[in-house]
Amino acid sequence: MDTAGSFFALFAFIPFIIYLVLMVFFVWFAVSLIKTLKEKNQILKEIARNLENRSKEEI
């Protein structure tokens, strides 16, 4: 009978564990998305600089 009580206590922590895992996943996803977007912006800035330099050389 004592083991049944411990199982109910374990079930009480399952929603908390799921919530914690989801929060960690969302934070990881947001950080990786921001990092990727910063890299893309840097690449686009380099492309824009190259296009500006080419247009200045043509004039």
Image (cartoon, grey):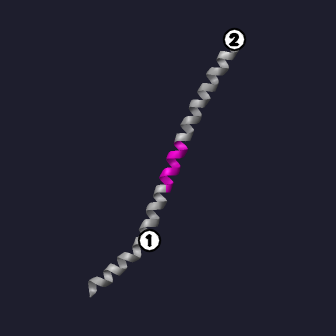
Q: Secondary structure at mark 2?
A: helix
Q: Amino acid at mark 2?
A: Glu
Highlighted magenta segment, given as a residue range: 26-35
- State the image coordinates of residue 4 (x, y, percent, origin top left): 30, 84
Question: Are dots 2 and 1 in contact, CB under 8 Å?
Answer: no
Quadrant for the N terminus, please.
bottom left
Q: Residue at x 46, y 56 (%)?
A: 25
Q: Secondary structure at mark 1?
A: helix
Mark 2 or mark 1: whose residue is earlier in sequence: 1
45 to the left or right of 3: right
Q: Is residue 6 magenta?
A: no
Could you give the CA–CA distance between mark 2 and mark 1, rounded to whole angstroms?
Answer: 64 Å
How far across and down, in percent of the image, does residue 32 sit?
Answer: 50, 46
Q: Left or right: 41 with respect to 32?
A: right
Question: In the displayed structure, would residue 12 be above or below residue 37?
Answer: below
Check disc 2 and report the residue beneath it.
58
Quarter of the figure that contains the C terminus: top right
The verdict on residue 32 being magenta is yes
Q: Is residue 36 above or below residue 7?
A: above
Residue hosting label 1: 15
| Image vertical order of residue 55 relative to residue 1, above or below | above
Q: In percent of the image, x 47 and y 61: which residue is there?
A: 22
State the image quarter where residue 8 is shown.
Answer: bottom left
